[in-house]
Image (cartoon, rainbow, N blue to C red):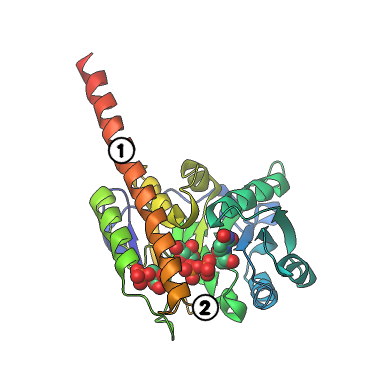
Amino acid sequence: MTQTNALGRTGVNALPVAKTRRPGSTRQGKNVQRVAVIIPAKDEAERIASAVRSARAIPHVDLVLVVDDGSEDDTSNVARGAGAVVVRHSHNRGKSAAMETGAAVVAMRDADGRPPRLLLFIDGDLGDTAVNTAPLVRPVLEGVADVAIALLPKQPGAGGRGIVVGTARKAIQAMTGWSPKQPLSGMRCITREAFEAATPLAKGWGVETGMTIDLLRRGYVAVEVPCDLRHRPSANDLKGQMHRAAQYRDVLVAINFRKVRGAMDSVRHTNQVRH
Ligand SMILES: O=c1ccn([C@@H]2O[C@H](COP(=O)(O)OP(=O)(O)O[C@H]3O[C@H](CO)[C@@H](O)[C@H](O)[C@H]3O)[C@@H](O)[C@H]2O)c(=O)[nH]1
Ligand SMILES: O=C(O)[C@H](O)COP(=O)(O)O
């Protein structure tokens, strides 16, 4: 497990923990910390049922929410049949928007007087390996980190050349000091507080890169945790290359927006110091 905070120091022992133990993380009575799994899903009818069933088996999870992001297939019905709560975008709005919708719906279902649920975002194509995101919960539950990000094993059939991943990693390192191994990994367990601090999220495929930069710059702590997951990787065909082009575009937008905002913040800060 590698860990970082805004100062970019790494190594579990070298780092301060994020916070003291949260009141909600005890196992006593109604204070048992609950976790909501949020699955943004576009045209995942083939794999969503096993992902939902598998996610329901993760300890602490009492809600599995599928956000159908304008699918043209039977994703909603299949997910509901497997035991998920389902909400649907009437048209496709992108993964990031589906994550925001999911978090808003979970907030509506969080009970008054109880700690808000931890949010565990996972992809809809994990099939029955979804349960293997369980190790992401513990570091957040125990207050070791504010966000825990899955490190996936090498995926058979993956056709990437590391261009998008490398761009995201370099930018995160330049802006926060931390060099994540898998900056695009969307399997993330995060506290409600940290999620709110990272909103509004960067659009589309820029969401993970933007979220990591925003959280670390605000002093939140991230860890990467190995998880034995299998997903449908993008191959090296035309469809895969088109997908990577869209990822590259969104990641660059997220990075550049944060560069400009960072520059404006430092001008504002300098002006405040002068006056
Ligand atoms: O418009 C869309 C497109 C996709 N999805 C869902 O988003 C998830 C991830 O999409 P996928 O097609 O599996 O993308 P990948 O390229 O395989 O995703 C990798 O890279 C993305 C960042 O570019 C991360 O969000 C993912 O977590 C990571 O697995 C899946 O559940 C999709 O159904 C939506 O909700 N809306
Ligand atoms: O296949 C992947 O890992 C992603 O689509 C990112 O593409 P990349 O390998 O070209 O960075």
Instruction: Tell me what residue is drawn at x 64 percent, y 71 percent.
Output: 44
Residue 138 is at least partly visible in this image: no
Task: Return the residue nearer the eye: 116 or 89.
Answer: 89
Q: Secondary structure at mark 1?
A: helix
CA separation in Å, label 2 and label 1:
34 Å
Give the image location of residue 197, x and y in percent: 47, 42
In the picture provided, is 256 more to the left or to the right than 157? left
What percent of the width, then of the height, locates residue 149?
44, 63
Q: As drawn, is 238 to the left or to the right of 79? A: left
Whether the residue under disc 2 has CB within 8 Å of ligand 1? yes
- For mark 1, does the 10 Å Cα neighbourhood hold few (<14), some (14 to 19), or many (20 or more) residues? few
Q: Quadrant of the N terminus?
A: bottom left
Residue linked to disc 2: 232
Q: Which mark is residue 19?
A: none
Residue in view at x 24 percent, y 53 percent: 177
The residue beneath circle 1 is 260
Residue at disc 2, secondary structure: loop
Nearer-N-terminus badge (2/1): 2
Looking at the picture, how far across and down is residue 82, in whole percent? 76, 73
Q: Quadrant of residue 74?
A: bottom right
Towards the viewer: 25 or 107 = 107
Report the front residue among 264 and 271: 264
Compared to 66, does 175 lie above or below? above
Residue 234 visible (yes or no)? yes
